[in-house]
Amino acid sequence: MKQTLLDKVSIFLLRKGFTLKNLTRTCFDILARRNEQILLVKVLEDANSIGREYTEEMVAVASYISASPLIISEKAGSKLEDNIVYSRFGIYTLNLATFTNSIHNKFPFIKRSKAGLTASVSGKKLREKREELGFSLNALSKKIGVTSRMIIKYENENSEITINRAMKLYDLLGHDVFNEVNVFMNSMQLRSKFETEVSKKYVELGFEAMETRKTPFDIIVK
């Protein structure tokens, strides 16, 4: 199953103009580049099969080459749904359909978090759309099932809301009021590891150095 999914991802990226390098015995399966965009992709049958140490190394390697780390899988215990962003220890995790949509710049706005399925509302866009369609604060709040004060809160800041409220907003105001999740932007910071005298020497010389275990090289230096 993994090989089939890996083949589908590779063929899709090639058709979209990416240059590909298939990686073996590393923490990634595919290195893909198109112009300035670099993707480091791990394809898994089940995203839950990957541990924290593994994902931290994925993020670190991606950070050093300014790449976007991604996990593509069809399940994480249970099936991954279309157009929903999941996360495995901070790395965006998507099914194939969500990934292909994202390559086409059709980013999802629903994500799975500890609070369940949520969406981020753009306060500015919400206010503009509400006023454009002629909804008063009171009228919109009743349709969504919250107080007028809560609508004001939504409009004054970017708020995370539950999927039930998000779908009600979507039906009334459309998808423009939500902040899309750009899966190619990852906010996790690089964690440098200085475990041997060799890497320490590079750091002392003014370089950044990180040791790796699941790549075909031992130390990355820049």
Image: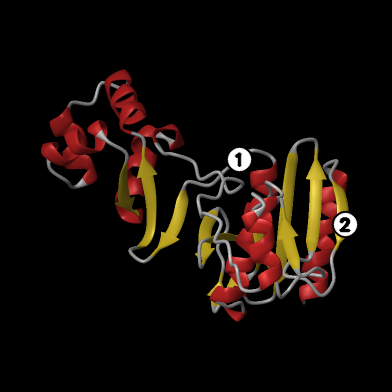
Residue 108: x %, y % from top left: 53, 47
Residue 76: x %, y % from top left: 56, 74
Q: Nearer the viewer, residue 45 or 61?
A: 61
Q: Name above or below for residue 76 compared with residue 199.
A: below
Q: In the rendered image, which quarter contains the N terminus?
A: bottom right
Residue at position x 72%, y 51% from top?
39
Q: Name above or below for residue 36 compared with residue 222.
A: above
Query: Could one spot residue 96 in this view of the protein?
Result: no
Q: Name above or below for residue 179 compared with residue 199.
A: above
Crowding near the residue tagged with mark 2, few <14, some 14–19, many ≥20 C-alpha atoms within 10 Å: few
The amino acid type found where label 2 is placed reads Lys
Separation of marks 2 and 1 at Cα, in angstroms = 25 Å
Q: Quadrant of residue 168?
A: top left
Q: Which residue is mark 1?
A: 106
Crowding near the residue tagged with mark 1, few <14, some 14–19, many ≥20 C-alpha atoms within 10 Å: some
Q: Earlier in the sequence, mark 2 or mark 1?
A: 2
Q: Nearer the viewer, residue 1 or 206?
A: 206
Mark identifier at residue 21: 2
Residue at position x 63%, y 57% from top?
203
